Amino acid sequence: MLVKNYKGILEELILYNPFDDIFVITSKFGRRWGKRHNGFDIVPKNRSRITIRSVGWSIIDHINYQGFGAGNFVVFKSLYYPGVELKFFHLKNPPIHKVGWETKGKEYFGVMGNTGASMGAHLHLEIWVDGKPINPELVKWI
Ligand SMILES: [Zn+2]
């Protein structure tokens, strides 16, 4: 059960940074070009490090490809935070693990890419709580 403060902001969600590096936000959560941007776009500050790691105890729920959208993408369901889903878009290749793979922590599964509707290599990361996208900037990244 996630605790929300009086403004409805999640106070408890703590996730691992998906890069082995500090990241820069290149596009924020919210409305963009008349559409909702359900996540944020990030790139590692030191661009030589482009591997993506899982962000906590979770299981791969879904893997697919969308040529005009998410590109190679993977959806994790958090096991530590029931009701939380993590979606990683535009991976260079399909993830190296299959549906059902369970991570205990910060484990490598793919490489940042530019597949689907993407202009330049970046990671689009969405966090859904109980079926609704939340602003990833509200999460504590460690
Ligand atoms: Zn994006």
Image (cartoon, rainbow, N blue to C red):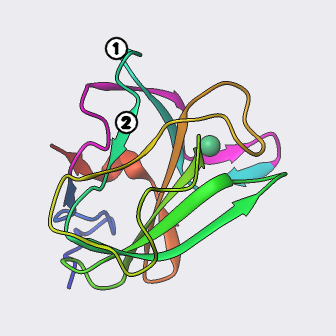
Question: Is residue 33 shown in magenta?
Answer: yes
Secondary structure of the residue carrying tag 1 is loop
Which mark is on residue 68? none
Category of crowding for the residue at label 1, using alpha-carbon neighbours closer than 10 angstroms: few (below 14), some (14–19), many (at least 20) = few
Q: Quadrant of the N terminus?
A: bottom left
Q: In the displayed structure, would residue 138 be above or below residue 130?
A: above
Q: Type of residue at label 1?
A: Asn
For the C terminus, the image quarter is: top left
Which residue lies at the image location 27% right of the left edge and 25% below the top edge?
22
Indicate whether 134 appears above or below 136: below
Which one is nearer the viewer's eye here, 18 or 29?
18
Say whether mark 2 is within 8 Å of ligand 1.
no
Quadrant in the picture for residue 50: top left
Asked whether the beta carbons under mark 1 and mark 2 sit within 8 Å of each other, the answer is no
Residue 101 image point, x, y percent: 33, 74
For label 2, the residue is 51
Residue that badge 1 annotates: 46
Q: Quadrant of ligand 1?
A: top right
Q: Residue at x 26, y 42 (%)?
A: 17
> Is the CB atom of the residue marked by disc 1 within 8 angstroms of ligand 1's nearest atom?
no
Numbered disc 2: secondary structure: strand
Q: Earlier in the sequence, mark 1 or mark 2?
A: 1
Kindly identify the amino acid type of the residue bearing the numbered disc 2.
Thr
Residue nearest the observer in this picture, 107 or 55: 107
Left or right: residue 108 versus residue 100 is left
Whole-percent x, y for residue 104 in the image: 15, 67
The residue nearer to you, when weighing 123 against 107, is 107
For the record, the magenta segment spans: 16-34
